[in-house]
Image (cartoon, helix red, strand yellow):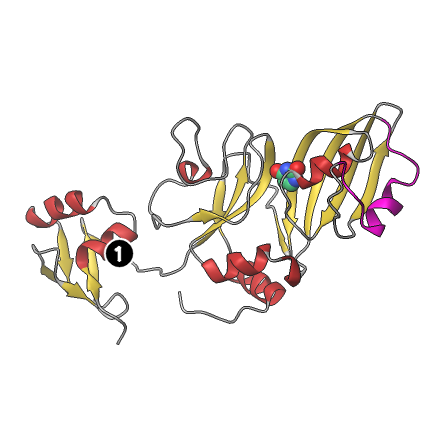
Amino acid sequence: MGKKIRLDRFLAEMGRGSRAEIRQAAKKGRIQVNGRVEIRTDTKIDPDGDRVWMDGKPVQYLALEYFMLNKPQGVISATKDPRHRTVADLIDGERRRDLFPVGRLDIDTEGLLLMTNDGELAHCLLSPNKHVDKTYFARVSGRLPEDAADRMAAGMRLKDQTQVQPAGLEILKAGEEEAEVLLTIREGKFHQVKRMFEALDCRVVYLKRLSMGSLALDGRLQPGEYRRLTEEELAGLRADTGTGEKEG
Ligand code: URA
């Protein structure tokens, strides 16, 4: 038997409303535990063993949740913000309230963002010691120097003298005024990709994250859309980071 928690916490964590709303729902007889109407929301239940229903539908307890979001531009990588829409606002519907983004993408960056409440996995994905590659597509203005890929592969110094680890640059198109590239980095320093191109006297005009470790952005997700990770995708991320199998 698992650890017991209050019924209102269980339902609030599973995104079924605030505690006050859940109390009201219980009073109206909308909540059942093991087939019987439960009007008290301070009742302790076993999230894994007891069967909880709300409005005639079972509520499954998920301790850990994982979503892949195609972050659109104009939205910030935070859970709350007084002025801007956040990536957490985009994941609506029935989901845990404690999801957070794994790392930050700038407001004008698009692409793959993992949203979870698994702190251990998040920590490992972001740790430079775990060497989890992040690949970005970038469109840059300016002329890329001939030795751009070599300089990035060697580990370069940014304009402010910050040293960054070696990175992989694949040039898809290069012209006199603009280039399109794939850049793979292992760290996540502030504005890192933009600053790496600034060090080459170029400017990133469009940036999209395509992958993080073995997790690739699902091309069917339009900016602003999301879906749950599959079992295989999650197993892949755990293998990337060496984090163990978990219940959830
Ligand atoms: N590097 C950047 O400069 N911006 C991002 O959003 C991500 C990586």
* Towards the viewer: 247 or 123: 123
**Image point 14% across, 53% down: which residue?**
31
**Image point 37% across, 40% down: which residue?**
92
Q: Position of residue 121 (x, y in %)?
A: 51, 60
**Image point 13% across, 46% down: which residue?**
25
Identify residue for label 1: 59
Q: What's drawn in magenta, residue-wise? A: 143-159
Q: Choose top left, top right, bottom left or bottom right for residue 51.
A: bottom left
Residue placed furthest toward the bottom: 1
Whether residue 69 sits left or right of residue 60 in the image: it is right
Disc 1: CA contacts within 10 A as few (<14), some (14-19) or many (>=20): some
Residue 3 in view here: yes
What amino acid is labelled 1 in the image?
Val
Q: Is residue 155 magenta?
A: yes
Q: Is residue 72 magenta?
A: no
**Image point 75% across, 44% down: which residue?**
183
Residue placed furthest toward the front: 161
Whether residue 90 sits left or right of residue 114 in the image: it is left
Residue placed furthest toward the top: 177
Q: Position of residue 234 (x, y in %)?
A: 53, 61
Q: Quadrant of the C terminus?
A: bottom left
Q: Position of residue 194 (x, y in %)?
A: 70, 35
Q: Quadrant of the N terminus?
A: bottom left
- Helix, strand or loop status at disc 1: loop
Residue 58 in view here: no
Dividing the image into four equal quarters, which quarter contains ligand 1? top right
